[in-house]
Amino acid sequence: MRQVSEYELELMKAIWDNGGTALYAEIVTSLSGKGMEWTKNTIITLLSRLVDKGLLKTNKIGHRNKYIAVVSEEEYRTRQTENFLDKVYEGNAKGLVSTLIQKDLLSDNDYEDLKKYWRGGENE
Amino acid sequence: MNEILKIVVSLSLSGTFLIFILLLFCLFFKEKLNKSWQYYIWLIIIIRLFLPVTSEINFVGRIFGNFEQTAGITTKNDKQFTENISIQNLAENNSSTEEQLNAQNTELQKSWYNILKNNSGFIWLLFGLMMFIHKITIYQSFVKYIKASSSAVDDINLLEQLGSIMKQNNIKGNVELYKNGLIASPLLIGFFRPCIVLTNAEITDTDFYYIILHELTHYKRRDMFYKWLTQFTVCLHWFNPFVYLMKYEINRTCELSCDEAVIKKLDIKERKLYGNTLLNAIGAGNLYKNSAVTVTLNESKELLKERLKSIMNYKRLSKTGMFITILSTIFICVSANAAGAYSDNYKKSDVSNNITLYKLSNVVDSEKETLKADYYYLPPKEPSQREILSQYGSFGISFDKNGKMLFEGELVRYFWDGYYIEDCGRAIHYEYANKDGKIDIRTTRNVIDNHDGSVNQFGELTGIIKYNEKDFDSFVDDNGNIIVHYEVGTSDTIAEDIAENAIYDEKVFDSIANNESTFIYDETFAESSLTQKGKTFAEIFAEYRDYGIEYKEDSKGSGRGNVYYNGKLVKHFADQKNNGSVFTYESKDGGKINVYTIYDKNGKLIRIDESR
């Protein structure tokens, strides 16, 4: 998957929040809710870049474009994590987790949840 | 010459004429005319180079018309020559096969030549098309190259600046923003997804602002389309060096007028900043040979210098400037219209002025007390000596240093080419008269058997013979003037008179007795005439049969006979078609009534009427 810039990710989030599909107007409302008042050219440009990168596809409804997310937020995260893991930890998940714990990036609650999740996985 | 070729060449000629006029205007009023005018006025010339429409006043069409007339005679002669061969072959089936073979060989050689000649326009256009496709391919590979080596600008601030400039200037659509390390200066590419490509160099916000403003102005004005329209025109007229000059001028004024549009809204300080941006945008030189049609910010140093100069000298259009602008626009438009082009319209009006017309004068044969009629072919124009010599030179005709015709060294008084129609007069194709001449001469020609009971007396020229002294008076009227049937320059009057009266008016022809005048026959226009190959009077009159006309030919097959209208013997039959061609006929045995044809505006014969 090609890398997505932070602003493009904001647009993806707006679409995911809208249930995976959104019209231009809905994206604008969602963005301005977060204080991002971008011009039309910027938004359309970023959206078409996302289409080029294969994260979105468009569906014409009358004159308006409906933007449909090709990957879900979950899928995106998984792929990004895998990518990150491969690149930075060479696929070593343990290394990643130890970094997270050592640097207090995980709260105690998070840690307990993770443990429970891990054991559940073992029992299967 | 091929029709397409003629149209393209005439358009090119017309356009070249306009290019020169416009360049002169721009040279004289460079400072007075604004740059946008100097840019968009070329559109009129492009339209002129495209559209084969033409008006009444038609400069180029006239040139072409004249050219065609001269060319027409020779080609027609060729055609007649081959036709004669085939007619002979038909006539003499038992003639030697060698002759037939020769004829076939000539035909074969002619056919290759004809294929090439008939398709020359097509080949011409094909070459232009190939050039255009080549240009598109170059452009596409250029866009590909740029896109592949570019990276999208992720900086939201730059994107937002671009967006807000678009909003301010009310520019619709979507413009992408890229950066590229290989280009020398910022440019705008892409038709459907326009894209501003910046250089990788670090630029200030001001520079960024003006670069974007400049490129967006190009986008807003659709300069890309204009450039490609120009490119297409250049490819269509690839053979014309002046269209390249036009292309250069359009590219130059494109940048100048784009600057003008940008600085219109700026104050003097901002103009300076804009100028600085242009200077800064100059890179280390083009890395990619910029032969493609693109809209770049900078193209050359000379142009940049001119642009900076005109930015600093920018003035709003003065009143005189406005006046000159309006006047120049009108002048260019009128010239574009008047320059015209070669077209079918022109040809039609041309032909109607050069109709075949015969049966013009009646000469009373005193001995027989009957009307004698002379028929002639109204010439398209007075023939040149060269044309006359090419026809008759080998039979002893020459000219002295005063331009008087000589026959075997003797001064000619009267010369005519044609043939006698039995008992009824003459069919005259060419006539010459000089009152100081000493001898009267005429041509002798072969008679072609049409093999349908009719003959064509206007066959191959076989010689020129002298009249005896006793015939001397037959070409002179009571006042001693030579009777000729055509006065140069009166053809229109005659045609009009005939049109009005539907039958010939003797007064007109009586007045045409002049001392020296000439006319020539032109086989191009002989088609609707008496001597048309294979078309007999019987066939001509068959067309009028449904309207009450009957034609009975003399049993001797002389090509003469009587015309009847509803059973009544017709004295004069006159048919003038809407295109102006006139056919008249006089019955052998006289008659009491005159009849003429009536056409509707679509040129369809509706009835035949009896005149006074």
Image: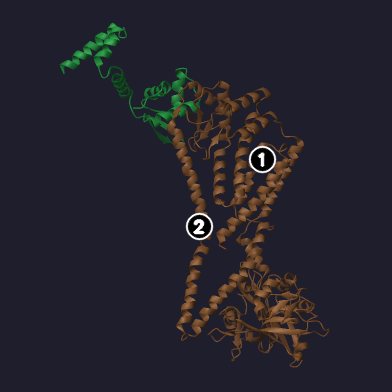
How busy is the neighbourhood of tag 2: few (under 14 within 10 Å), some, or many (20 plus)? Answer: some
What chain does badge 1 belong to?
A: B
Task: Please indicate whether residue B438 sits to the left or right of residue B545 in the image.
Answer: right
Callout 1 and callout 2 share a chain: yes
Q: Earlier in the sequence, mark 1 or mark 2?
A: 1
Q: In front here: B563 or A96?
A: A96
- Residue on which disc 2 sits: B123
In the picture, measured across the screen, residue B125 lies left or right of residue B464, that is: left
Picture coordinates of residue B377, whole percent (x, y) = 67, 76
Residue B598 percent coordinates (x, y): 65, 73
Measured Cα–Cα span from mark 1 to mark 2: 34 Å
Which quadrant would residue B437 be assigned to in this image? Answer: bottom right
Q: Which residue is mark 1?
A: B38
- Quarter occupied by the N terminus of chain A: top left
Query: Quick one: which chain is brown?
Result: B
Chain A, colour shown: green
